[in-house]
Structure formats: C-alpha cells, structure tokens
Image: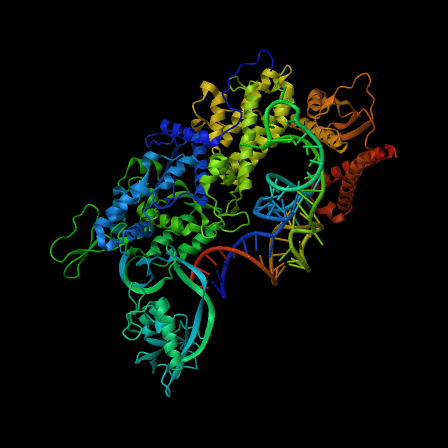
RNA sequence: GGGCGCAUAGCUCAGCGGAAGAGCACCUGCCUUACAAGCAGGGGGUCGCAGGUUCGAACCCUGCUGCGCCCA
C-alpha cells in the first residue's frame, strides 16, 4: 500500500461466519421497517402475496426455493424504487390441522365429540398459538423480506368475513348449490374431498368376474375390483348396440347373495370392448354408475356408512369394506359364481392426500361451486394476456385444467374451518346469510354443520388479505398483485382457484399480472424428495452449515424455468465457496483503499484494464436485468457467479495489484470500489446477508443499507464498452495463459520467477501491460546473464508475441514437442474443417457473407498457426 | 387409455441452425502475503438410435427405444 492510500478502517473478520451474523442483520432490517409497505406512497407498486403455507407445516426445500425467488424479485424491485409489498401468512389447513389436534386428543383418550364443537375449535386455536406457524420463524432465518405488519391467517376475522361475503355472492348468483352426488369420501377423516385432494396410484388389487343370473335363466358375467359393492348393485348395463346382449335388455337377472332381481339396461357409456361388455351398476358408490343410475331412474341404496363399514342387511353387515371384499368373493365362490379371478390386478386407486386412506366414492349431499363460468373467466384472463404464465409452455396445462374443470365440492364434514353460512328452517327453508345479516332464529332453525374447503379461503388470498370486501387503501394500491410464484405441481391449487375468485370478486381484474412456475426439488440422483424416501434435505441444516446466502444462491442457480432441480450438498458447498470468494475479494479491495467516495474518473484517465472491467460490468448489469425481467434466475445468477469469480477476481484484481503499486493507484481504488459496489448490488437480491455486510463496510457512513440502496443502472453510471480495451485485455489474458501453460508443461514451479524477454511485432501494442504480464505469469526481467534456453510464439490479435525464457538449464524438449504437437493437431483439424467448407460450392453460394468471411479468417489463422508451429518443431533439438 | 416433457462429459444440467459448455468429480503442480472454502495447468463427449430437410443439424421434421410427469 502506498503512503497516500486512504486508511480505510475495515472491521471485517478474516472469515465470514453466516450463522453468527445473518439473524442479527435480518432483525436490523425488520426493525428499520424496510419491508413495511406504504399504501400512501407515490412510488409504483410491486406486490407479491406469499402462497400461504399450511399452519401445521414447517419449511422444506420447496418452500425455500419458492421464497428465495420471491425474495429476489421483491428485493430487486425495492432497489429499483418500487413500493414493494410482499405479504406473508398461513392457511388454516382444515383437515391437516384437525387431524393433528385429534391425534393429540387421542393421546388423552378423547375424541373431538367428547369435547363438543365449540371446545374443540377452542382447542385448535390453542394448538395454533403454541405450535402453529413454525414456518414463520424459519422464513426469518431465510431472510424473507416480507411485511410482517400485514401477516394474515385465513381464519382471522377479516378473512372470515371475506369468505362469508364470497359465499353469499356466489350463492345469490346461483354459482353455489347443494346437491346429492358421488363425492370422494375419506373414511378416516370422515369428510368429503375435492378431486385435487385425491392422489391416484397404481395399486395391486384383484379383478373378479362374477356370473349374475339364475341357474337356468339369463346370465351375464361382470367384472369388478370392488366385489363388496355388488351388494349395492341395482342394474347391469350393456351397450345398446351390443348384439350379444340385445335380447337381454329389459329383462331382469338375479343379483347373487341378495335375493334381489335387477334390470339389464342399455347405456351408451358402457364400453363393449372392456371385459365382457356388461358392467355392474352401483349408483351410490361409483361416479359413472351414478350417472347411469340417473339416466335409468335406478334406486341408489348406500351400503356403507361414513367409516366404510357395510350397512347392507345380511351376513356382511358390520364388516369393514376390506374385510367384506374377500368375504363376498368367498360366498360367491361357494355358489360357483366366480368365473375368473385375476390377482394381482394393478389399477389406479385414489387415496386421501392428507392421510393416504383409500378414498371411497360415496353418494352424499354436499355444497358445490358451479365452476364453468368462473373457470371460463379465469381462462380468459390468461387468453387475453391480462395474466402471463411463465414459462409459456405451462399455459397449455392451465387451459387444459380450467377448460375441463368439474364442479367443486366445497363442503367438508369438519369442525375446523369457515362454517357454511346457511340456515335451514322448520318448513324446508334455506337461507344464506351475509356477514352483516342476522341469521334467522327461533324454533326449528338450524345452521349447516359443515365447513368450507380450505382452498375456498385460500382462493381469496390475493385480495382478502388486503381487506376485501372493503375497498381499502391497500387494495387500491397493491391489487392486482404483480406476480405469483409457485411450483408447477400446484398450478391448479393456487393459480386456478385464485384466478377464478379474483376475476369474479374484483370485477374482472385478474389477481396477478404474472404467474411464475418453478420446478420441483429433487435429490442428487433426480428422485423426488420425500420424508418417506428419507432423501429430504432440511433447509435449516443447510443454513446452519453453509449459511442462508449459500442455500439461496444454490437454489437460485438451479432455477431454470419449468425444469426440476437436483440438489446435493456439494452444490451448497460450492455456493458457500462463492461467498467466501466474494468476502475475500472485498476484503482485499477494501484493505487496499477501494472506495466509492470518489467519483469514477473519466474514461480517458483510466487504464485499459479499468475500461475493460467497467465495460464488462456495464454489460453484466444489462444482461442481468434482461434475464431477471424474464424470470431467468439460473442464468442471471450463473452470470454473476462467473463474472465475479472468473473476470473480477481472477483477472481484474490481479491487474489491479500491479496498478496499485504504480501511478494509477488512486484511480484503481475508485474502479475497484465501483466494481465491488455494483456487484454487491446485483447480488443482493440473492445473497442479501453477506452483500449487506460488505456493502455497509464499503460505503461506511454513506450507505444506510443495501436493502434500500438503488439498483445499478440508476445511480451508478458506468462507461460505455471499449472494444479496443477489450481486445487488449483479451490479448493479455491469452498471452499470460499461454506462458502459464508452457511453464506448467515444463514443470516450472508456479511461484518461481523466470527471467524472460518479451518481444515480437505483437508486443509493442501491449507494452503498457508488460508489468501486468510479468506479474501474472511470474516473469522477471532479463538480466545481464540472460540466455534464452527456450522460446515460444503466441499469436494474438495485436500480432505475434515472442517469449524467450531463461530456464537456467536444459528444457524438457519432449514436453515442449508434445505441447507443440498438440497445438498443431488442433490447427490442422481447424484447417481441414474450414477448407472443406470453403471448398463447398453450396456453402459459398448460400451461406450469409459474414459467415463465409468468418470461416475464411479461421482458415487463414489456422494456416498461419501451422506454419509457425511447424517451424518451431523443426527448430527443436532432436 | 389420452396429453405433455426429457434423453449432451463420471454426476447434475445449460446450449436449441453456422468453431461442443458450466458446476461438481477426476489428474498434475503449488501454503505465489485477498482467498487451500484457494491458485495455476490438464484429461474427458461419433450431443439415445434410425431416417429426412438444409450449403451446413446437438439444435428443425418423422419414426423407434428408454425414462419422467399430468389427466382418465
């Protein structure tokens, strides 16, 4: 360091210990109010609502990715001068939460019925206060810049009011109705489930073919995987054009084990190709059979209760469905009615997504949303371009979903949730009550016992959280939200429902301008992470060991639009290493007086090295901007990674060392300061902690916090790219690299200074960089006793440079020959390829002129290289 | 059964018409005063298979094979 270097006090420790420093930095940001949005601000708004995590849940890698991306988006916009609202909260997760509390009760030997509805709900609130929302603390650890003052919960009073308002409006518009239909029933949770709460898997079962009919009369064979349901059969159906059965249509057959006779009906929906072409019809326990039953006015007896225990009178009554199945088959076999059995028979079986119990289709009276008009409007919002889905390929999936959506069962037979605001009167009256209306009272009036699906309240999230149905200042300022970020696997859960409700409730205004869908997290070998597989990585563990920054950077670097990402510890370690690199580079720069307190000198006063790095910096700023506008997180972060490490650290810092020792020291400090400043700003949305720590040190009293600093391109103006400087530095890099390669091949130790004479036609334009070349390639000046024992020629843009080296001894001729022969082979291959192209008439005639020119230059360069290398090979002692 | 996507270096993935790339792993040499969580150098791929379009194909088209996802 020179005498006049400003003595910048840096309190930076030698190493960055994220786990020690990150939490305090976060608390400072929250205390300073940086994340609190102001609806009265005149800045343009940028809004993100956090897809509400489940109150029972804790942070997993999928959340970590989701949050990292939302945080990066909002932090950048904040730096760009937007009034940013990132709104956090949770949903009440009806089934999951009720299950957790019921399990707790079960440990005390109680059921919810022992407590009664009111006490039970009270108990759930107590549970929530004590154990719920662990994820909120974990979000702080991650660094989420959310507005905690606006934290919401779907069961809060305001949001409950929104739910009731929405229900009432839909009801009055005829978009909510009550009907008896086949629904997915979970016999363990004792509630209805919507289609998306059912997971299908290919399970092993049995396919049993049963002969229906009398011994001597008409007989048909039907096949089933659920033999016990035959107790509820009320018909056999065949296709009307199926000649095999034409004579039987309209007749009756005996239903075994029951003594009942059931009709044979003709229905177009029967597939004559499948099995025998005749199907049993159980209207109360199968959705297709239900439709057939409706068309033919069949009776629809239920044969199971809510636990899936057989209620049909007879020997099977009281048996569980899985107990009854083999029992029924055995009884049929005894009667000689089993025609065929296929076991195992693999077929798709629905499971409750909350408890994995096999779902039972069940006929029951439920509340429904008529989705057709809502879904059409939700689809139109994307079709019209009001909402853009990223990546665009996934819009197709969205349309497939919203254009083919079935009506949505919204009632749940639970106690934890928003109770349906409908009262039934003594004379069959049905009254739906809005939030400010008095429910009917008096003798015989009862309220519907069911609650609404959690997704009903989550669907209102983008506006219920802002005070809807009141027209609040928040709604005016922050709705519609700017972007919704979530995994493509729950496109239907969040996006479709929020779109339907948002467009409906807000007079056609879409809930979000953009939807960004990221991929799923997988383990190192590409398998889905799950607790049951045991391959899940705990984000908290990574944050403790590598830092929240390193984990965030890892996730962002893997976030290619629409693609899943495989994670392994090595990736996190790599990101940690990057942070360390940044730390050390900044420490070096600052200890050498890097400063942002002096304006950048005009280009004319800067060296080519300075102009090169500043030009690159400017290019990186605009590239990063372009990429981030397009949600290209992986590309943007990889660009920053390589620029910081490969260009700034590996080259500019090394060049700066030379400049700091010379007359350009002051300017170099300014360039170093500005380069570092810009890189820290660009990286801040992804790695907020370490950049904050470094930036506040770099700026000293001048900078309050990087959180509220301006994004590059605003206050930090950079010089234009300088092609001459770029070419010069490219030459310096190539020259240094070639000399290093020679040294390595010759077995010269990296630290060992080697006397060298530099010359040749190409060297004079690089004369100003001689000190740098000597420093980076570890060369010393040729002394009086200099005697070149080896030399090499390097072809550069500026011409050929001759490097004569005094290795003070014999050189390894074999190694040198090998090196030259390798270069020769490369040049010969190049010559062959380019000549082949240029010898092709079609190529010359049809390829664009600039391409042909480029190939010509390459051919000429290759030819010259061959000549040069051959000469050197010939000159080598044998 | 219907629809969609993916096959590129040992692994995980970029590239998507004009010279095969990155990270990690691997090999060699280095504690060169910012950094061994590092530095310097290096090896490694007929871009799944077969056809076609084109002056030119990892990239576009067709078929096949193998994986994965969604819906029924």
Does the rendering let one see residue A442? yes
How many marks do you count on the picture?
0
Whether A550 is drawn above or below A661: the answer is below
**Residue A72, horizontal then vertical, whole percent:** 46, 36
Whether A324 is drawn above or below A827: the answer is below
**Residue B41, horizontal then vertical, whole percent:** 70, 34
Which of the two residues, A147 or B9, is positioned nearer the viewer here? B9
Relative to A721, A698 lies left or right: left
- Locate residue A400: give its quadrant: bottom left
Q: Quadrant of the N terminus of chain A?
A: top right
- Locate residue A36: give its quadrant: top left
Relative to A642, A317 lies left or right: left
Outermost top residue: A3
Q: Quadrant of the C terminus of chain A?
A: top right
**Residue A288, horizontal then vertical, whole percent:** 37, 68
Outermost bottom residue: A216
Outermost left residue: A443
Relative to A109, A561 lies left or right: right
Whether A872 is drawn above or below A191: the answer is above
Does the rendering let one see residue A640? no
Outermost front residue: A108
Which of the two residues, A846 or A790, is positioned nearer the viewer here? A790
Tell me which colouring the rendered structure shows.
rainbow
**Residue A621, horizontal then vertical, whole percent:** 54, 31
């Amino acid at each position: 360091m020179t005498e006049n270097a400003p003595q910048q006090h840096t309190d930076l420790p030698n190493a960055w210990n994220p786990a020690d420093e990150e939490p305090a930095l976060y608390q400072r940001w929250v205390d300073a109010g940086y994340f609190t949005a102001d609806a009265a601000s005149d800045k343009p708004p940028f809004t993100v609502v956090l897809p509400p995590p489940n109150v029972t849940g804790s942070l997993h890698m999928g959340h970590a990715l989701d949050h990292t991306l939302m945080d990066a988006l909002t932090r950048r916009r904040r730096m760009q001068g937007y009034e940013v609202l990132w709104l956090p909260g949770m949903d009440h997760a009806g089934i999951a939460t009720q299950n957790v509390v019921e399990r707790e009760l079960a440990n005390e030997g109680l059921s919810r019925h022992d407590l009664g509805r009111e006490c039970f709900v009270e108990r759930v609130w107590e549970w929530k206060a004590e154990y719920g929302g662990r994820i909120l603390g974990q979000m702080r650890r991650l660094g989420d810049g959310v507005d905690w003052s606006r934290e919401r919960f779907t069961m809060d009073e305001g949001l409950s009011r929104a739910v009731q308002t929405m229900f009432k409006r839909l009801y009055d518009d005829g978009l909510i109705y009550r009907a008896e239909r086949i629904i997915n029933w979970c016999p363990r949770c004792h509630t209805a489930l919507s289609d998306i709460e059912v997971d299908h898997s290919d399970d092993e079962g049995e396919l049993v073919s049963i002969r229906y009919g009398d011994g001597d009369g008409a007989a048909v064979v039907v096949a089933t995987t659920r033999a016990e349901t035959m107790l509820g059969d009320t018909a056999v159906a065949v296709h009307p054009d199926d000649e095999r059965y034409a004579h039987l249509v309209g007749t009756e057959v005996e239903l075994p084990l029951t003594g009942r006779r059931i009709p044979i009906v003709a229905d177009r929906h029967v597939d004559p190709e499948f099995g025998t072409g005749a199907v049993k019809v159980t209207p109360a326990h199968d959705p297709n059979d239900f439709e057939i039953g409706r068309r033919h006015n069949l009776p629809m007896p239920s044969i199971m209760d809510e636990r899936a225990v057989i209620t049909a009178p007879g020997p099977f009554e009281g048996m569980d469905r899985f107990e009854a199945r083999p029992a029924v088959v055995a009884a049929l076999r005894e009667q000689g009615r089993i025609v065929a059995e296929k076991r195992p028979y693999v077929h798709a079986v629905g499971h409750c997504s909350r408890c994995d119990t096999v779902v039972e289709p069940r006929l029951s009276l439920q509340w429904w949303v008529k989705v057709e008009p809502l879904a059409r409007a939700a689809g139109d919002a994307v079709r019209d371009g009001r909402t853009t889905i990223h990546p665009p390929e996934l819009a197709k999936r969205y349309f497939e979903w919203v254009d083919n959506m079935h009506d949505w069962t919204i009632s749940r037979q639970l106690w934890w949730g928003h109770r349906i605001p409908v009262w039934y009167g003594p004379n069959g009256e049905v009254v739906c009550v809005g939030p400010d209306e008095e429910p009917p009272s008096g003798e015989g009036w009862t309220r519907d016992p069911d609650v609404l699906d959690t997704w009903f309240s989550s669907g209102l999230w983008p506006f219920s959280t802002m005070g809807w149905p009141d027209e609040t200042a928040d709604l005016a300022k922050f709705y519609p939200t700017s972007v919704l970020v979530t995994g493509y696997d729950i496109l239907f859960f969040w996006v479709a429902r929020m779109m339907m409700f948002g467009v409906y409730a807000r007079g056609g205004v879409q809930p979000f301008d953009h939807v960004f869908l990221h991929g799923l997290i997988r383990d190192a070998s590409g398998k889905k992470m799950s607790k049951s597989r045991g391959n899940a990585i705990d984000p908290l563990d990574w944050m403790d060991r590598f830092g929240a920054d390193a984990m965030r950077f890892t996730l962002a670097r893997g976030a290619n639009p629409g693609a899943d990402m495989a994670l392994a510890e090595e990736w996190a370690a790599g990101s940690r290493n990057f942070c360390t690199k940044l730390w050390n580079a900044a420490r070096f720069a600052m200890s050498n007086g890097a400063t942002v307190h002096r304006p950048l000198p005009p280009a004319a006063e800067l060296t080519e090295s300075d102009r090169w790095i500043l030009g690159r910096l400017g290019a990186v700023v605009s590239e990063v901007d372009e990429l981030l506008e397009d949600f290209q997180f992986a590309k943007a972060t990889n660009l920053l990674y390589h620029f910081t490490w490969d260009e700034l650290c590996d080259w500019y810092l090394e060049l700066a060392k030379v400049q700091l020792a010379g007359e350009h020291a002051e300017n170099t400090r300014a360039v170093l300061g500005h380069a570092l400043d810009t890189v820290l700003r660009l990286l801040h949305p992804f790695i907020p902690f370490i950049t904050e720590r470094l930036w506040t040190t770099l700026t000293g009293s001048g900078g309050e916090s990087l959180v509220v600093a301006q994004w590059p391109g605003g206050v930090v103006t950079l010089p234009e790219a300088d092609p001459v400087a770029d070419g010069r530095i490219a030459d310096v890099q190539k020259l240094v690299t070639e000399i290093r390669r020679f040294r390595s091949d010759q077995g010269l130790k990296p630290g060992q200074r080697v006397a060298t004479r530099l010359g040749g036609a190409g060297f004079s334009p690089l004369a100003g960089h001689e000190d740098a070349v000597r420093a980076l390639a570890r060369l010393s000046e040729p002394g009086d006793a200099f005697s070149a024992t080896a030399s090499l020629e390097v072809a550069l843009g500026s011409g050929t440079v001759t490097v004569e080296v005094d290795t003070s001894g014999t050189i390894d001729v074999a190694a040198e020959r090998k090196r030259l022969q390798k270069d020769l082979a490369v040049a010969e291959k190049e010559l062959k390829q380019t000549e082949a192209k240029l010898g092709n008439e079609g190529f010359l005639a049809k390829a664009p002129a600039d391409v042909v020119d480029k190939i010509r230059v390459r051919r000429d360069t290759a030819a010259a290289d061959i000549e040069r290398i051959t000469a050197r090979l010939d000159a080598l002692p044998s």
